[in-house]
Amino acid sequence: MIVDAHCHVWPDALAARLVAARPAGLDAVGDGTVSGLLRAMDAAGIDYGCTLAIANEARHVARTNEFVGGLDRSRFIPCGTVHTGISVEENLRHLRDNGIVGVKFHPNFQGLSLGDPAVHEIFAALAEEGIPVLAHVGHGNDDAATERGATKHVSAIMDAVPDLVFVAFHYGGYHDLSGSEEQTLGDPRIYVETSWPPRLADLGADRVRALIERHGPRRVVFGSDWPMADPSDEIAFIRSLGLPTADEDAILGDTLAGLMGVTTPSTTTPQTSTDLQEDHPR
């Protein structure tokens, strides 16, 4: 089974504008729509994609979670949003009401810090609910964003909320692997994710193998960061590393499926990109 931990999607009416804005200064390879993601998943042989949605402002939390929670569960794992601008209980209510099974936290775009005690309070509530947090960690668009997402915050989060399932994107240090190697990689309390847009191959095979070995392959999960990177290319690169089959399987999907409560591929007929186009003609 292949599960992609890192898929950004937006409603069709917003996707073109947001992708054109070149988030994080990257040129997208996909269009950011649900149908576009499904085509990319079909092409790459991905069984499930974690669909990530974030609210930059508290007033958008409800609507954002409604969108991602309404996607097809035979292919998508909904990862919604929280914000310190509303109460912990209101955050939880919006997640529960929409059947959200994971939360994406993005200090770069949300303007919220991984070091904020108010964020830790929300994370503690998520841990009690058994909801994993998938977070951008590392550099952001400017110095303030980089501080909000700094690698140094991860160990403090786990000290404060030891029961939290925390997945640190970009090996726990986007554009700051030295800091991650000192503080995060090898920490058995967390999971790390593989994406390094625009191409994981830019890190080089020896570097990626060393990162995986340092952290332990059973604590590493695959993510593409679609639409910023091509899932087919990222999977091919991981397969080219020559890892033991069991380790490769764990990274590409088995570990994340367990964290998200997906134990086998859907036993119903999965929706394909063609089905979606028929259901929602343009």
Image (cartoon, grey):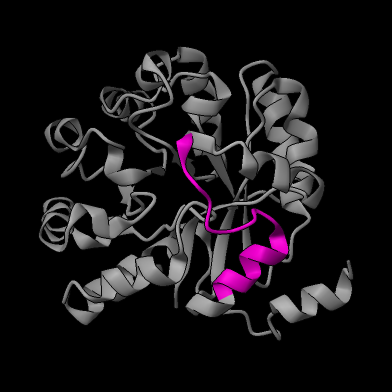
Q: Is residue 68 above or below residue 189?
A: below
- For this view, does 72 lie left or right of residue 183? right
Q: How many circles with numbers are drawn on the protein?
A: 0
In the image, residue 4 sits, relative to residue 160, either above or below, namely below
Residue 81 placement, left or right of 167: right
* Image point (55%, 27%), residue name: 109
Q: In terms of image quadrants, where is residue 199?
A: bottom left
Determine which quarter of the picture holds residue 64.
Answer: top right
Residue 160 included in the magenta stretch of the image:
no
Residue at the (71%, 21%) spot, across then down: 58
Is residue 97 in view from this perspective? no
Q: Is residue 29 visible?
A: yes
205 or 30, which lies in front?
30
Task: Tell me: residue 93, above or below residue 49.
Answer: above
Q: x and y percent of residue 24 in the render? A: 47, 35
Q: Is residue 235 above or below residue 117?
A: below
In x, y percent, where is residue 268?
A: 70, 84
Is residue 31 on the magenta stretch? yes
Quadrant holding the N terminus:
bottom left
Viewer-nearest residue: 196 or 27: 27
Q: Residue at x 33, y 44 (%)?
A: 170
List x then y, in percent, for residue 280.
87, 68
For the C terminus, the image quarter is: bottom right
On screen, residue 258 versus residue 204, left or right, reads: right
In which quarter of the view is residue 34 placed?
bottom right
Q: Is residue 28 left or right of residue 195?
A: right
Range shown magenta: 25-41
Residue 207 percent location from the top left of the image: 13, 54
